[in-house]
Amino acid sequence: MSRLFNLDFQLLHDSILTLIAVFVLFLGGSFFFFNPARKFLDKRRQGIADDIEAAEKAKEEAGGLKTEYEEKLKNVDAEVEEILSDARQRALANENRIVADAREEASKIIDNAHREANLEKQKVADEVKDEVINVASAMAGKIIAASLSEADSKRLLDETIKGMGEDTWLNQQ
């Protein structure tokens, strides 16, 4: 009977050579194919880990910025109110300054008007005095020239006063 599997020296020799060839191929394949593939996979794994780490850092920074902006948004209302308050104070100060300047200008105008009225009053008073002097000298001239009696001098005085008119006496007041 023949065996299915015949163990002889040739089979043993071929089996050992096949094992050595497979081992050499495994070492060669590992050196030329598996190591570069492992290096590629390690680089890829490291790149992914770096990307994940960078994404986490970016997420933390974004969270920090978000809280910072939320704080700023909370403070915006206070800043707006402060700016508006400052603007109101400046507007009120400008208003007070403008009102004070207007009052000062009005006071100057009133003082000038009073001064001009006093000058005009003085001018009218001087004119009245000149008129009274002229009337008195005219009356004296008439009295001396006529040497009139007392009744005649009163009559001349009344005529002279009427001749001057009431406007002259009213201007003196």
Image (spheres, rainbow, N blue to C red):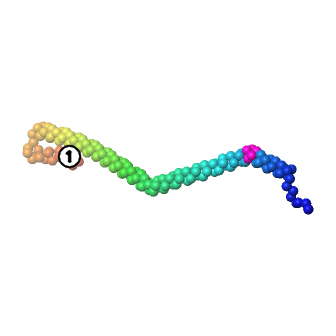
Q: Is residue 71 left or right of residue 157?
A: right
The kind of residue on which mark 1 rests is Gln
Q: Secondary structure at mark 1?
A: helix
117 relative to 8, above or below: above
Residue located at (58% from left, 51% from top): 53
> Going by the picture, which residue comes out furthest to the front?
1
Q: Quadrant of residue 132?
A: top left
Q: Is residue 19 shown to the viewer in this render?
A: yes
**Magenta part of the chain:** 27-33
Q: Is residue 102 shown to the viewer in this render?
A: no
Count residues near mark 1 (Cα–Cα under 10 Å), then give few for <14, some for 14-19, many for 20+: some
57 relative to 144, above or below: below
Point out residue 142 in the picture as x, y percentages from the top left corner.
14, 39
> Going by the picture, which residue comes out furthest to the right?
1
The secondary structure making up most of the magenta span is helix
Residue located at (85% from left, 55% from top): 7
Residue located at (50% from left, 53% from top): 64
Point out residue 9 in the picture as x, y percentages from the top left corner.
85, 50
Most foreground residue, 36 or 3: 3
Point out residue 148 in the picture as x, y percentages from the top left corner.
9, 42
Q: Is residue 70 left or right of residue 8?
A: left
Instruction: Specify whether residue 94 is painted magenta.
Output: no
- Position of the N terminus, as image quadrant, is bottom right
Point out residue 170 in the picture as x, y percentages from the top left corner.
21, 49
Q: How many marks?
A: 1
Instruction: Specify whether residue 31 is painted magenta.
Output: yes
Most foreground residue, 94 or 68: 68
Residue beneath label 1, please?
172
> Going by the picture, which residue comes out furthest to the bottom?
1
Residue located at (15% from left, 38% from top): 137
Most foreground residue, 99 or 140: 99
